[in-house]
Amino acid sequence: MVRSHSLVLFFGLAGLASVSAHKEPKTEAEIETQRALQRAAYYCAPAVGEFTAARKRAWRQQVLAGLPLNQAAFAPTAGNPSLPTNDELFASGTFESEAQPSSRAQQELLACDVVEDETEMQNNTCVLTPIVTEGPYYHKMGHPIRQNIADYQIGLLTYLDIGVIDVNTCKPLPNVLVDIWQANATGHYAGHPDPAPHLKDEQPQVGGKRAGLLSAFPRTNYHEQWLRGAWKTDSHGIARFTTIFPGYYTGRATHVHAKVFTSWTENPNGTFDGHKLAHVGQFFFEDELNLQIDKMWPYVENPIRDIRGRTRNWRDSLNIFEDSHGPEGEYNPIFKMHLLGGVINQGLVGFITMGVNASYDLDNWWKG
Ligand SMILES: *[C@@H]1O[C@H](CO)[C@@H](O)[C@H](O)[C@H]1NC(C)=O
Ligand SMILES: *[C@@H]1O[C@H](CO)[C@@H](O)[C@H](O)[C@H]1NC(C)=O
Ligand SMILES: *[C@@H]1O[C@H](CO)[C@@H](O)[C@H](O)[C@H]1NC(C)=O
Ligand SMILES: *[C@@H]1O[C@H](CO)[C@@H](O)[C@H](O)[C@H]1NC(C)=O
């Protein structure tokens, strides 16, 4: 039942061929399978070229509904009105144009027979997701409870599907608050637009613990909340967000921060106060995907592009990327990404699962 709906996903994988570490086919059967996939890709290419918002929605309904976790995960009709589509988020023409799909193309598309999808909850066999620094850009107060954190930040539409399991039971953890925050497409956090005036010309630290980093930009815009938000996991332990792909800044690999609260109170203004914090961590993306997105507007306008450039995952400051894999490397902190449509411009969806210890009660404050 999955197969006929998996085309887009297959193209997603094909499009990210350089990203997802594809296994080289070895046996004759594997080679034959790959050839068949290539033929399918060739045959379906014209249809794929016609992807539209309507089809994307249909795809989300069909493919992602293959998830045993939730029906039609991202479909606006499935009780997720706060998850907008690309065209609702951005001015028309910003990304892909949205022509009506021809039903013939649609049929051809769905007739293509391709690989299994991978929309199951990722499960690193129930390991504890490493706790790493929350960094200097968390706002203890003022994180809104909302699924769409993109606000009016321009960038590549990215859905994040974050699963939480409790390592004490290895079962999904419903009703916990997943709080995320990230930089915008050109590497800034809401509220922190500029370096402190006397550090305007600061150079990244050479050597020492903070090698490669600049001093944190101070919080000067107290009202800004973009690219920050928290959402409660559903009965399957999943919290979904709409955001943009994050940009990079000096010394850091591209990342998304996350906290998990097992107890909190909602404020009348839509923000929350966290009480019991079970997890603080960071998630990453494959470097090849980062490099691909670096070439897209507005990511090309990153102010440090021609000065220091992006920090690759393996050069991440403070060892955060490495530490995020855990002491024995048993955890994978990298989002598993798929294309939403036929081309990357139409957006991405990323899946990750955190293993948290719901008994933890961490201190919700950065100490530098
Ligand atoms: C994750 O994997 C472990 C070990 O295989 C299993 O016991 C557990 O039920 C799985 N949890 C989920 C949420 O799939
Ligand atoms: C929202 O309400 C809380 C609690 O009353 C307050 O601390 C916070 O500053 C308010 N945030 C915003 C953005 O208004
Ligand atoms: C979770 O944390 C509690 C309290 O610190 C501890 O007793 C328990 O062993 C932890 N569970 C796991 C699976 O690490
Ligand atoms: C990111 O945020 C900074 C600081 O507010 C802003 O100057 C910049 O224009 C934003 N980037 C994009 C692509 O909007």
Image (cartoon, rainbow, N blue to C red):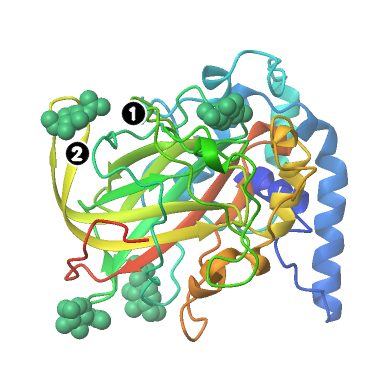
Quick one: label 1 or label 2, which is nearer the N terminus?
A: 1
Mark 2 crowd level (few <14, some 14–19, many ≥20, 10 Å Cα):
many
Instruction: Give how far across and how far down residue 119 sits, in percent.
Output: 51, 55
What amino acid is found at the position of numbered circle 2 in the picture? Phe
Q: Position of residue 325 (x, y in %)?
A: 51, 74
246 displayed left or right of 346: left
Mark 1 or 2: in front is 1
**Residue 158 is drawn in which quadrant?**
top right
Secondary structure state at the residue bearing disc 2:
strand
Taking the view exactly as shown, the residue that stands out farthest to the bottom is 328
Q: Position of residue 16 (x, y in %)?
A: 74, 52
- Compared to 83, does 168 lie above or below? below
Circle on res. 222: 1
Tell me the residue that label 2 is attached to: 272
Query: What amino acid type is highlighted by mark number 1?
Result: Tyr
Residue toward you, 344 or 47: 344
Q: Nearer the viewer, residue 194 or 17?
A: 194
